[in-house]
Image (spheres, rainbow, N blue to C red):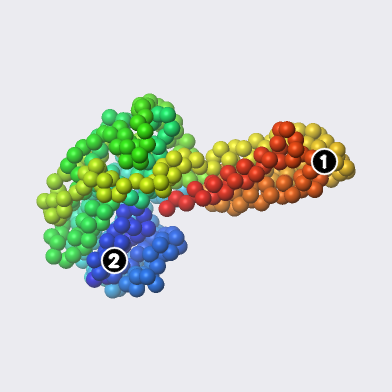
């Protein structure tokens, strides 16, 4: 059968697509940004695979019609954590799904499997960003129940996978933190589920003989604390034991507010205020639902980690998780500001080599402006790659120009030219760490 999978390149969506293909289904994979994902699972390798660019938040009923023409089932893996410049919870969770449901009704597609979240409930609370996540998820579940379709709602808990993305990537980064392991709400309990088990559940749910009109929690029965998760991940990574630091909630909220602000620059950090609100209340569900309703026995935290031993690539990822380009941006911004504040001194370096004062001053001002622009450019996610490449190019130009005008500085005991090379290498390292998916 052909299955339309929406949000097919996310953490859950990727495993769902792989499982459906492995079971012989044809898949139409939809999402708003599909270039990298389509290279990972190319149609040339999987002839039964099609990719379609579509944004659930804005797609109309007419937009869905050609994608549903030959589909027998729909799986919605799309979702957002918090309102921001790139995400609108109401549009993604409620309004977009309402239009998708209307399109399914018109196209005669009966089976719709929707990925919600464990713990969604009417009495979870009001007012916080985390509650807005809950409220929009709950609104979607309500409209599905009234849709008349053969709907199945799957509610995963804390999803962990061999691949790391979003919150699971953050947990690995915390587990590899040097010295101490910072954890907020360390005593909050969560129930985990393997991404592979979520994919197995979806593969069963799309089948027409699986009973519909049900909500099924996808969690393991064992509840563990966030501290347990981080400590277990550190042991899995093969790192020596470290002391746990219980981060005060106020400190964590300040960091989350900073992450919220970075969202306006295009960065999608999992450490958002909505995350803290969700974790504070814990993540819980019916740990026996998967086996009772789908005949799937979910993996425990220990079992899923044992099935995928960590290697050097996992340790590299975890240790480098927090090495984002922020400090590099600060370095270049300060370099530019210092250049503007010390124009006579910087000009003297060039005039001492025989350059006239006017062009020397212009070179200093131009170089300072470029440094400042590149530092600011790194802050904005859409410009980060270009800015990092610019840093590499400018570092090379500094070394070449400096060699022509002041070759003696290569032997300067303070090493001004020698220090330029590590700056270029840091920009290259930041480029290597830039991928989010």
Task: Decide: few, some or many residues near mark 1? Use Cα within 10 Å; few <14, some 14-19, many ≥20.
Answer: many
Marks 1/2: CA distance?
A: 64 Å
The quarter of the picture where residue 2 lies is bottom left
| Residue 187 picture quarter | top left
Q: Nearer the viewer, residue 413 or 179?
A: 413
Which of the pair 309/168 is nearer the observer? Answer: 309
State whether residue 8 is above or below residue 192.
Answer: below
Q: Nearer the viewer, residue 275 or 230?
A: 230
Query: What residue did someone put label 2 on?
Result: 21
In the image, what residue occupies the spot 40% across and 62% down?
40
Q: Is residue 108 visible?
A: yes
Residue 156 falls left or right of residue 276: left
- Expressed as whole percent of the image width and height from the top left, the position of residue 71 reads 27, 70
Q: Is residue 174 above or below residue 140?
A: above
Q: Nearer the viewer, residue 109 or 385?
A: 385
Image quadrant in which the N terminus is located: bottom left
Q: Secondary structure at mark 1?
A: helix
Task: Name the side, left or right, on which 321 lies relative to 49.
Answer: right
Residue 350 marker: 1
Question: Taking the image as drawn, is residue 336 in sight?
Answer: no
Q: Earlier in the sequence, mark 1 or mark 2?
A: 2
């Amino acid at each position: 059968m052909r299955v339309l999978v929406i949000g097919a390149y996310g953490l859950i969506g990727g495993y769902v697509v792989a499982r459906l293909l492995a079971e012989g289904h044809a898949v139409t994979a939809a999402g708003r940004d599909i270039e990298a994902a389509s290279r990972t699972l190319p149609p040339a390798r999987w002839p039964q695979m099609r990719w379609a660019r579509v944004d659930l938040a804005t797609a109309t009923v007419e937009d869905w019609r050609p994608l549903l023409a030959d589909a027998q089932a729909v799986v919605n893996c799309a979702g957002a954590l918090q309102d921001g410049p790139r995400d609108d919870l109401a549009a993604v969770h409620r309004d977009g799904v309402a239009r998708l449901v209307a399109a399914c009704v018109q196209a005669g597609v009966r089976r719709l499997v929707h990925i919600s979240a464990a713990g969604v409930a009417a009495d979870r609370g009001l007012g916080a960003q985390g509650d807005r996540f809950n409220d929009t998820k709950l609104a979607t579940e309500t409209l599905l129940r009234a849709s008349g379709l053969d709907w199945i709602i799957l509610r995963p808990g804390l999803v962990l996978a061999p691949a790391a993305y979003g919150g699971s990537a953050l947990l690995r980064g915390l587990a590899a933190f040097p010295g101490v392991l910072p954890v907020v709400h360390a005593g909050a309990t969560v129930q985990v589920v393997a991404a592979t088990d979520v994919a197995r559940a979806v593969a069963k749910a799309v089948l027409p003989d699986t009973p519909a009109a049900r909500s099924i929690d996808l969690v393991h029965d064992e509840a563990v604390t966030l501290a347990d998760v981080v400590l277990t991940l550190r042991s899995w990574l093969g790192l020596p034991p470290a002391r746990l630091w219980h981060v005060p909630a106020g400190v964590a909220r300040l960091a989350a507010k900073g992450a919220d602000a970075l969202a306006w620059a295009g960065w999608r950090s999992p450490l958002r205020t909505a995350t803290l609100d969700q974790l504070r209340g814990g993540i819980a569900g019916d740990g026996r639902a998967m086996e009772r309703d789908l005949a799937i026995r979910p993996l425990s935290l220990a079992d899923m980690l044992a099935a995928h031993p960590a290697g050097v690539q996992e340790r590299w990822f975890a240790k480098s998780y927090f090495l984002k380009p922020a400090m590099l941006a600060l370095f270049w911004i300060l370099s530019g500001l210092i250049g503007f504040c010390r124009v006579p001194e910087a000009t003297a370096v060039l005039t001492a080599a025989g350059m006239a004062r006017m062009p020397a001053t212009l070179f200093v001002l131009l170089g300072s402006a470029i440094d400042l622009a590149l530092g600011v450019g790194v802050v904005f996610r859409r410009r980060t790659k270009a800015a990092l490449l610019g840093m590499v190019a400018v570092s090379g130009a500094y070394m070449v120009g400096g060699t022509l005008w002041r070759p003696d500085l290569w032997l300067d005991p303070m090493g001004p030219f020698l220090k330029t090379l590590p700056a270029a290498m840091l920009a290259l390292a930041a480029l290597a760490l830039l991928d989010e998916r």
